[in-house]
Structure formats: C-alpha cells, structure tokens
C-alpha cells in the first residue's frame, strides 16, 4: 500500500487531483492511499506518507517540507505544472512512484 | 527573462509565507471564520430584500433585534477571537503552552481597554465595555498587544522562570502553576502601561493606537489605488505560478477585515455603509467570479468559441471547479503561468473590472458590500447578491464577466489558432 500526501494552500485544488489519481490507481489494479491537506497540516501529516507532492502554486513550501521530511526519509516534490492543471492522475501518480523508487 | 524573475520571486514568496508573525496572523483570522459565517447567515436572513413585502416595518425591527445577537456575539467582537488566536498560535509556534498564551493575550488586551462608555451627550457610564472596542475599533491595538504579550510570556517560560511541581501532581495543576509567574509578569507589564497612559497622558491605548496606527493604515488600505496595486501583485505572483493571495492577503487582511466589520456595524445599525473596499469586496468582486483573475468568463469563452482540442480539454476540466471559484486548472492547464500571450489580459482584466465595480458602488448604482462574510467558494451572482444584499450586486458581476470576456477574446483566438495548427500538423505527421 503506497501512501501519497498532496499539499496545497487549503487542500482544495489538490483534492481535485486526488480523485483523478485514485481513479487511475484503481484502473491499473494498484493500491494506494492518497489524500490532500492544507499547508498548515502538511508538516504534521507527512510522517504518515511515503511521498509528498506539493501543488505548484505552493512550490515555495518545498524547502521547508523537505527539511521536515528528511527525518522520515521521505521525498518531497512539486507536482508537474501541466499534470496539475489538466488534473492528469496518471502523470501525477507516476511522478509519485518515481520519487518513491528513488529512495 | 521570466525564469530569472521567477527565481527572484520564489524565495521572497517562501519567506513571506513562512514568516512566523504572518502565519500566526493568518491562522488567527481563520479561527474567527466559522464564527463570522454564523453571524453573517443571520444578518442575511434578517435583511432579505423582500421582507418588507411580507411583514410590517415594526415586525421587521423586532425580527432583526431578536436575531441581532448572532452577529454582535461573533463579528461584533471579532478582535477578541483574533487576540486570543494570536496569543495561542504564537505561543504554540514556540512550543509553549498555547492556551495560556491565548488567555494572557486576551487579558492584556482587556487591561488596556477602558471599561467606560462615553455617549455623545450626557455623563459617562462606568463598568461597561463599548462593543466597538472589542470589534473593528480595537482590532489593531488587539493585534499589537497580542503579539507583544505572547512574546513576553513565551520568553519567560523559555527562560524557565516557572514554578515546578513535584512529580505526582496532576498535569493540569502543574501546567497552571507553570504559567503562573509568566502570566503575572506579562499582565503586570500591561497593567503598568495602562496606568501610565491613563494617569500621565489622560487618554487610553485604544484611542492612541486607533488614531496613530489604525486610522491612517486602514484609510490608506481602503483606497482604490492601493487596492489596484495589491491586485496587480496578486496577478503577477500567480503569473509566476505562486499563490498570490496567500502572500499578499496575509499583509492586507487585517486592514480589509477591519473595514468589513466597520461596514457590518453600520449596516446592522441601519446607517449607510461607509466603505467599498473591504474583505467582502476583495473576496467576492475579485475572486468570486471563477477564481483569481475572474476566469469563469474565460472558461465559457473557451467552451463556446474555441476549437483546439487542448483548449477544449482545459475548458471541460475547469468549468466544474470554476463555478465554485477554484481555477487552478485554468492557471496551470491553459496555462496562464509564464505564458507571454496571456500576461496582458491576465493583469488588465482584474484591474478594469475592479475599477468598474468600485465606481459602480461609489456612484450608488450598486450597493456597497454590507460586511457579511460570504465564503469565496459560493458561486458567482449568488455571492454578489449575498455580499451586497441586492440584486444589483449580482448583476454587476455579470457585467464584469462580459468585460473579462471581451478583453480575453482576441488573445484566446490567437492561442486557439496556434493550437489548431499544431494539432493539425501532428495528425498529419501521424498519418
């Protein structure tokens, strides 16, 4: 079971992407827990995740979150802008997988 | 050139977003959000435009006074929540017991508050706190006091000047004793400030801060030109893919919120609404028409008039969230970010629309925002009617959308033509 945390300002626009990613995950028969939070909860939640993806409009959070995430050995990255805009669940999920694979 | 600017903006945005005081301020205002929504619902319900056709004037009056407490107990004393919130969140950010930080901030604020009401005519009434001191008028003193008192409190706690209980004492008891000395010192400081100001200068901190800080700042922030500048920066930040509001609003929100509560107080008292620019104006008339940059009109233009597959795809994804003023699909999918073809309509249309709305309200064609809090996710037209308690308030948004449509249309056409050509050559290549 892969655990993917998405973070943006209020967790609203990333929640759009969560649905699309979940649909893709089910369609390929994978299993993953994907959820979205606002930036204030991201720090507290990241220890429950295997990887953290940030909405591109909050890209300036990356440094701070990565510092926190290092304690748990988790990777943090900004979601590809186009994948985010087009709510491309496949591309975002593959980005998450790639990050986890790099560990 | 855009990349260079982006590299320059990113760390600034990060610093502003992560600034301890701005983060605390943002969280403190968020604390009062559900409360102000509760108050707003009852202001809207008791002021529905068609009420006077259903009941007599005296019936409306008693109906309003029956439910008036809902807004008095929430937005009417908003400074109380903001002060407590700042005390709580700032202490917490230093890993110091938050609840005492909040309580100490609140008492520090009350220590500077005169417990006396001076009516325009007649003798002063002792032993009461005028509501507006805890609402709009006391907002800036409240914020300043809360930050300073929480800083003093946490410094003393961190220096370990506390009474430590032996193990075995219940934690709640130990905690309240641990807060004892920091609380005594912090509160004494504010008590002495108040004694000094009232006895030596024969005034009070409320009036001093109101005249010296709040009135000038709020007067400035309530003007149309600073508002246009703020909107300009929000659009520029989004153009570089950064969340503009989270950065600009954290600086402007204290001013915009103060103006909003001031409006509400006048409105519920049956007086003319004093301000146009306010939190409500910013939320509903700059974001509430499809999101930042008022892009619902752009999405409609794409769906009805553009031919390229890529644009159509964006339109289809963007229309659902766009109705609720979430427009990241447009911003990152169209894309707006770093797109030189789009920078002109992206920055021009919000400025034009804001000016049109402002002057429509200044001239009285459209009523001013009453000061009720309308969540920014309420769809266009409905949110405009709620914000101004009028039909015209929704109608002006439709006019605004038409303006956005006209400004964007030629630029969208260019993008569409480029995309169609690209898509054609791609299919030819495949064939």
Image (cartoon, helix red, strand yellow):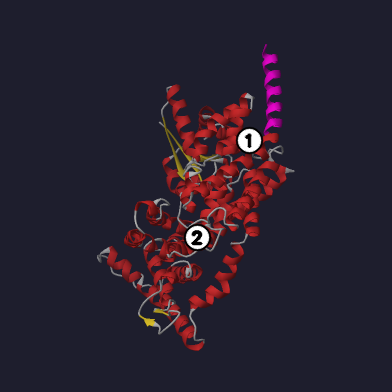
Give the residue at x 64% y 40%.
B337
Task: Report the chain holding disc 2.
Answer: B
Query: Is B62 situated left or right of B226 in this image?
Result: left
Q: Is residue B413 in the magenta section?
A: yes
Residue B39, given in percent of the width and then of the height, sits at 39, 57
Magenta span: chief secondary structure: helix
Residue A70, given in percent of the width and then of the height, sits at 51, 45
Task: Using the image as rendered, state which of residue B100 and residue B53 is in the foreground.
Answer: B53
Task: Using the image as rendered, state which of residue B62 and residue B334 is in the foreground.
Answer: B62
Residue B327, given in percent of the width and then of the height, sits at 55, 39
Q: Secondary structure at mark 2?
A: helix
On-image quarter of the N terminus of chain B: top right
On-image quarter of the C terminus of chain B: top right
Q: Are marks 1 and 2 in contact (CB under 8 Å)?
A: no
Q: Is residue A61 visible?
A: no
- Is circle 1 on the same chain as circle 2? yes
Residue beneath label 1, please? Answer: B335
Residue B229, given in percent of the width and then of the height, sits at 65, 55
Residue, far top: B431
Give the residue at x 68% y 28%.
B416
Q: Kindly report the distance in space between the C-alpha atoms of the residues bearing marks 1 and 2.
A: 34 Å
Instruction: Classify B298 as above or below B388.
Output: above
Q: Earlier in the sequence, mark 1 or mark 2?
A: 2
Q: Is residue B121 visible?
A: yes
- Disc 2 crowd rating (10 Å Cα; few below 14, some 14-19, many 20+) is many
Q: Which residues are magenta?
A: B412-431
Q: Which mark is residue B260?
A: 2
């Amino acid at each position: 079971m892969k655990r993917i945390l998405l973070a943006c300002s209020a967790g609203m626009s990333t929640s759009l992407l969560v649905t699309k990613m979940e649909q893709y995950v089910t369609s390929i028969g994978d299993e993953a827990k994907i959820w979205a939070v606002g930036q204030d909860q991201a720090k507290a939640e990241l220890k429950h995740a295997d990887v953290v993806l940030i909405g591109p409009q909050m890209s300036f959070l990356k440094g701070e979150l990565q510092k926190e995430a290092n304690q748990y050995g988790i990777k943090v990255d900004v979601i590809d802008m186009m994948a985010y805009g087009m709510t491309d669940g496949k591309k975002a999920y593959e980005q998450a997988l790639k990050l986890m694979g790099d560990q | 050139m855009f990349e260079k600017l982006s590299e320059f903006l990113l760390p600034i945005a990060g610093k502003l977003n992560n600034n301890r005081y701005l983060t605390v301020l943002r969280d403190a205002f968020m604390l009062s959000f559900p409360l102000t929504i509760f108050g707003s619902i009852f202001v809207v319900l008791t002021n529905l435009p068609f009420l006077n056709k259903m009941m007599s004037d005296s019936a409306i009056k008693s109906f309003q006074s029956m439910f008036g407490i809902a807004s008095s107990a929430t937005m009417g004393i908003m400074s109380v929540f903001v002060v407590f919130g700042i005390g709580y969140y700032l202490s917490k950010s230093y890993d110091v017991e938050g609840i005492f930080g909040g309580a100490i901030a609140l008492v520090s604020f009350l220590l500077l508050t005169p417990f006396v009401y001076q009516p325009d005519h007649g003798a002063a009434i002792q032993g009461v706190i005028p509501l507006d001191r805890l609402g709009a008028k006391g907002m800036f003193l409240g914020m300043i006091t809360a930050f300073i008192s929480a800083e003093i409190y946490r410094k003393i706690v961190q220096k370990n000047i506390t009474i430590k209980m032996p193990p075995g004492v219940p934690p709640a008891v130990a905690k309240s004793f641990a807060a004892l000395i920091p609380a005594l010192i912090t509160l004494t400081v504010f008590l002495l400030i108040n004694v000094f100001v009232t006895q030596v200068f024969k005034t009070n901190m409320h009036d001093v801060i109101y005249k010296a800080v709040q009135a000038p700042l709020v007067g400035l922030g309530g003007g149309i030109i600073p508002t246009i500048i703020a909107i300009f920066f929000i659009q520029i930040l989004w153009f570089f893919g950064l969340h503009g509001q989270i950065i600009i609003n954290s600086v402007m929100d204290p001013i915009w919120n103060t103006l909003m509560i001031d409006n509400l107080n006048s409105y519920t008292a049956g007086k003319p609404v004093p301000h146009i620019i306010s939190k409500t104006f910013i939320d509903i008339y700059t974001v509430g028409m499809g999101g930042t940059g008022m892009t619902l009109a752009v999405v409609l233009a794409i769906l009805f008039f553009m031919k390229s597959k890529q644009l159509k795809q964006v339109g289809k994804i963007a229309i659902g969230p766009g109705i609720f003023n979430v427009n990241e699909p447009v911003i990152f999918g169209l894309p707006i970010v770093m797109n030189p073809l789009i920078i002109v309509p992206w920055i021009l249309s919000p400025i034009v629309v804001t000016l049109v709305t402002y002057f429509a309200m200044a001239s009285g064609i459209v009523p001013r925002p009453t000061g009720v809090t309308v969540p920014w996710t309420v769809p266009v037209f409905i949110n405009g009617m709620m914000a101004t308690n009028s039909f015209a308030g929704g109608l002006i948004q439709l006019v605004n959308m038409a303006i956005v449509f006209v400004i964007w249309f030629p630029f969208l056409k260019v993008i569409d033509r480029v995309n169609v050509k690209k898509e054609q050559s791609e299919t030819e290549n495949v064939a």
